[in-house]
Image (spheres, helix red, strand yellow):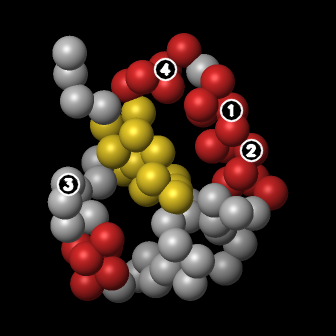
Amino acid sequence: MTTPARVLVTGANGFVGSHLLSRAGQSQAAHSLELVPAPSRFELRSAASLDDFGESRPFEAVLHPAAK
């Protein structure tokens, strides 16, 4: 069994992000993705934030539906 791709999702508490997580969990491809909601006030432009948050296992992609 392969390790699921780890994907950071910003804005997961917002309208688009919450629907994205909900739909992804229902899809047939859900077993191949590990969607990780970013904490509120997460600074995506900061390499240190990404390094700290993805310390255990790095992210392979970032989905950025956050408004700000």
Q: Quadrant of residue 33?
A: top left
Q: Secondary structure at mark 2?
A: helix
Judge whether residue 47 can be spotted in this image.
no
Crowding around mark 1 (Cα neighbors within 10 Å: few <14, some 14 to 19, many 20+) is few
State which tag comes first along the sequence, 1 or 3.
1
Mark 4 to mark 1 CA distance (whole Å): 10 Å
Relative side of 11 to 37, left or right: right
Q: Do residues under tags 1 and 3 come within 8 Å of each other at their CB atoms?
A: no
State which tag comes first along the sequence, 2 or 3.
2
Give the residue pinned by disc 1: 23
51 is higher (above) or lower (below) than 41: above
Give the residue pinned by disc 2: 19
1 is higher (above) or lower (below) than 34: above
User: x%, y% of residue 64?
Assistant: 56, 61
Relative side of 16 to 27, left or right: right
Residue placed at 59% from the left, 31% from the top? Answer: 25
Q: Do residues under tags 4 and 3 come within 8 Å of each other at their CB atoms?
A: no
Q: Do residues under tags 2 and 1 come within 8 Å of each other at their CB atoms?
A: yes
Q: Do residues under tags 4 and 2 come within 8 Å of each other at their CB atoms?
A: no
User: x%, y% of residue 57?
Assistant: 20, 54
Give the residue pinned by disc 3: 57
Q: Secondary structure at mark 1?
A: helix
Crowding around mark 2 (Cα neighbors within 10 Å: few <14, some 14 to 19, many 20+) is few
Residue placed at 58% from the left, 77% from the top? Answer: 40
Q: Do residues under tags 4 and 1 come within 8 Å of each other at their CB atoms?
A: no
